[in-house]
Amino acid sequence: MKIALSNNYAGNSWRQTMLKSWSEAADPAVKQGIVAAAPTFTTAENQATEQVQQMQNLILQGYKAIVVDAASPTALNGVIKQACAAGVTVVSFDGIATEPCAYRIAVDFQKLGSMQVDYLAKRLNGKGNLLEIRGLAGVSVDDEIHKGMVDELKKYPDLKVVGSVHGDWTQTVAQKQVAGILPTLPKIDGVLTQGGDGFGAANAIKDAGRPTPIIILGNRQEELAWWAEQRKSGYETMSVTIPPGCSTFAFWVTQQILAGKKLPHDIQMPLLEVKADELDSVLAKTPQGGLANKIYTRDDVLKVVDAK
């Protein structure tokens, strides 16, 4: 049976590592005859309409399963319903689709937001000015992380978000956007992020001649290297995101469904946090330009699923 990965965006290191991770799991599975083929397809413009057309083509090409990182939680529901009606298994991950016939591999993105707020509240004794860097506008992941932050901030009335920009989960975009808003902001004590933006924020703040606030990081190699350098002066923070290897989790879930295993339509996988005492060891094995990651095996996935 053939499995296809439908991806809506590849413009940052997380997405590129996600695609590479898929190949690390899928290519050996193809060679071993576990699946017949498992190619990836990425849209050029990050448009839901383009991804709909892409998925329609994959249905026509005879794929038995489509794993999808969706551009929108709802815009693909029509084509997903078409796929299910044609006997195609659809598994969404990262960017989740809401169509009930699709399997959904979710990360608690709201928790990713709330744990950042809790960390900063603890470090700042519940009082300070925060800058929020959001992800890609209109994508469900961005909305969920933001909601987790907003809800958790209600517990800490003296933590104030004094500025917000969209960094598109990309270092260069985040740096430009933060540099643009900084002149309008008071002193910043902490920076809430979504991944791929922490190092850009640090560079913009440094270039502006401002003191370095507590910046939450997202497991990118350049962020971890920056943190390791700052630690020499006593700087501490936290780093957390969804592992790009979530694509390998999705691959094995899909393979098991095709093999006949009964799985729930909603499956939750864990976040990947790099703690201070793990920084040096994680950084040593994280390639330049990449990020901390976990490649899931079939046994790893079965352990998570069966434990639920």
Image (cartoon, rainbow, N blue to C red):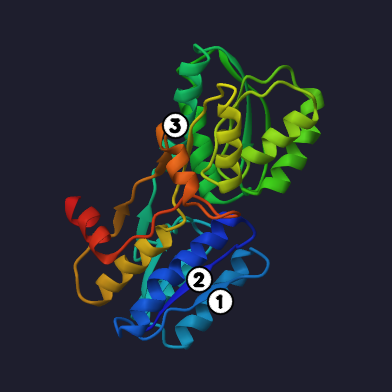
Question: CA–CA distance between discs 2 and 3?
Answer: 35 Å
- Amino acid under disc 2: Ser
Image position, residue 110 (x, y; %):
44, 38
According to the picture, the residue beneath numbered tag 2 turns out to be 6
Q: In the rendered image, which quarter is residue 229 located in?
A: top right
Judge by depth and name the residue closer to the eye, 306 or 53.
Answer: 306
At a point 41% along the width and 37% down the height, the residue shown is 278
Q: Nearer the viewer, mark 1 or mark 2?
A: 2
According to the picture, the residue beneath numbered tag 3 turns out to be 276
Q: Mark yes or no: residue 262 visible.
A: yes
Q: Earlier in the sequence, mark 1 or mark 3?
A: 1
User: Is 44 situated above or below 282?
Assistant: below
Q: Could you say whether the residue bearing mark 1 is in a helix, strand or loop? A: helix
At a point 38% along the width and 64% down the height, the residue shown is 248
Q: Nearer the viewer, mark 2 or mark 3?
A: 3
User: Is 125 situated above or below 33?
Assistant: above
- Amino acid under disc 3: Ala
Q: Earlier in the sequence, mark 2 or mark 3?
A: 2
Image position, residue 266 (x, y; %):
30, 55
Judge by depth and name the residue closer to the eye, 112 or 52.
Answer: 112
Question: CA–CA distance between discs 1 and 3?
Answer: 42 Å
- Amino acid under disc 1: Gln
Q: Could you say whether the residue bearing mark 2 is in a helix, strand or loop? A: strand
According to the picture, the residue beneath numbered tag 1 turns out to be 54
User: Is 33 situated above or below 149?
Assistant: below
At a point 68% along the width and 35% down the height, the residue shown is 201
Which quadrant, please, contains the N terminus? bottom left
Q: Residues within 10 Å of mark 2 (few under 14, many from 20)?
A: many
Image position, residue 191 (x, y; %):
61, 29
1 and 2 marks in contact (CB < 8 Å): yes
Q: Residues within 10 Å of mark 1 (few under 14, many from 20)?
A: some
